[in-house]
Amino acid sequence: MKRINQIFCLLMLVLGLAACEKEYDRPPLTEPEYTGEEANITIAQFREQFKDATRDVPIVIEDDLVLKATVISSDESGNIYKTIYLQDETGGIGMLVDQGDVYTSYPVGQVVYVQLKGLCASFYGDLQIGHPNAAATYYRTPWEDFQEHVLKAGWPNEAAISIREVSDISSLNENADAVKSTLVRLTGVHFEEGGQTTYADMVAEDYGTRVLKDVHGNTIDVRNSNYADFGGEMLPVGTGNVVAILGSFNGGWQLLIRDIEDVYGFDGVDPDEGGSDNPGGDVTTETVFEESFATGLGTQFEIIDKDIDGLDHVWSFDDRYSCMKASAYVSNVDHAAESWLVTKSDIDLTNKTAATLTFEHAIAFLDGEPSSAFTVIVSETGTENWTTKVIPNFSASNWAFVTSEIDLSSFVGKKIKIGFKYTSIEGDAGNWEVKNVKVTGVTSGSGSGSSDETPDIVIP
């Protein structure tokens, strides 16, 4: 009998293991179906309608507005924090959400309808969609509310996302509002510290800023979190490609990498050792124009007042900081004004293959975006077609001088004039101080003296 019991127990064990290996059919997944109102506003229209929203005063959306867009971001790697980025055929925008691992519910390529009524247009570096009752968390939408307002439609299709191809970083300024918060692919670029440091500062700070450079010498910041799973990896060496979300923060561009797989094709050849930055011959860099404003306006610049609303002046010398200062704040009143600080003589780039403008500047008392109030303008000598150069990486910090760099490669082979355009409106004048203006030019042994850079915005 004992023998029979042993055989019976062994038989039951075998049957039990076989039962554990049985594959049960999974319940069928249901394709998300949207049955609400059709979209009646685009991202471009949203940006225009709610452009007056500020960080301190968001605009609550009271109309029955519905936005249709596609998710282009993922927080899986940890480099994007509590934000989801949406893109349609007119542009992109970020939406703040008080939740992590959003990618598990709203993956890249997911089409969504955002029912905007009850949400708000908020501002943190750039216009965003937020929740009016969440001021303490930058207007992040609570997860429950987010799911009620952001409704999925169909299966995600990442391959259907439109990606803007960028080989010249300066071309991003052509139509800035149309490319903000969209997905871009930068080709033929390299990290300035490739092979020398990691993507993020793993000890000192939450974020690390790294610089990406194209073959024309234009640069853009890459913003990386030390919480990203690739934060401690070394920057690649050589020239390659980067897919990222093009962020805008207070008028300056910055890239947000979704995943390390979006950084690819780097050839391992240092551009400074015969790489793509210098495809032929010796390179000479020289200063072709310089003005410090250390003792005043000097003889190289003149002031052209376009509209100063009856004021005596807008630009004046500030001897405290040895710079030129523009301000339409007079007698405790913000006046409407437009005034240019422009070079009088030609800046000769006729024999150059690349050129760069650098200057130091500081601002104060400005509520709006610096990119709207303060711009650099450039014109070929003998024409009145002024090109606006939006100042990159321009943070609004009271009286803290920063150095900005503007690529002038689209003007090589020409003689040009440059200017600093100050614009104010009543109620928001702002102050702008400028000093240490310098233009450097590059001469290459085999340079052609021309550039394929796409022009920026032309002022008629």
Image (cartoon, rainbow, N blue to C red):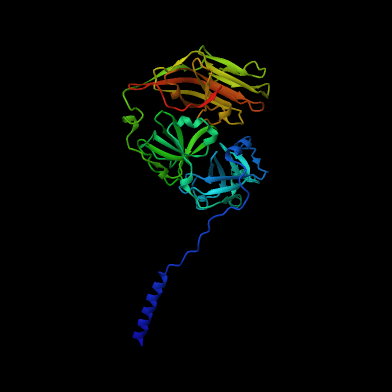
Most foreground residue, 159 or 49: 159
In the shown orientation, is residue 340 left or right of residue 195?
Answer: right
Give residue 134's position: percent from left, percent from top.
62, 45
Instruction: Kindly identify the residue that appears in the image at 37 percent across and 79 percent down.
Output: 11
In the shown orientation, is residue 327 left or right of residue 448?
Answer: right
Give residue 116's position: percent from left, percent from top.
63, 45
Most foreground residue, 46 or 256: 46
Most foreground residue, 193 or 47: 47
Most foreground residue, 447 or 130: 447
Instruction: Kindly identify the residue that appears in the image at 51 percent across and 30 percent down.
Output: 174
Instruction: Kindly identify the residue that appears in the image at 40 percent across and 43 percent down.
Output: 232
Instruction: Kindly identify the residue that appears in the image at 67 percent across and 17 percent down.
Output: 310
In the shown orientation, is residue 355 left or right of residue 312?
Answer: left
**In this picture, is 389 found above or below 157?**
above
Q: Where the C terminus falls, by quadrant?
A: top right
In the shown orientation, is residue 234 left or right of residue 127?
Answer: left
Give residue 340's position: percent from left, percent from top.
57, 19
Q: Count the marks.
A: 0
Give residue 245's position: percent from left, percent from top.
48, 40
Asked whether the viewer can see residue 296, the reply is: no
Asked whether the viewer can see residue 51, the reply is: yes
Q: Where the N terminus falls, by quadrant?
A: bottom left
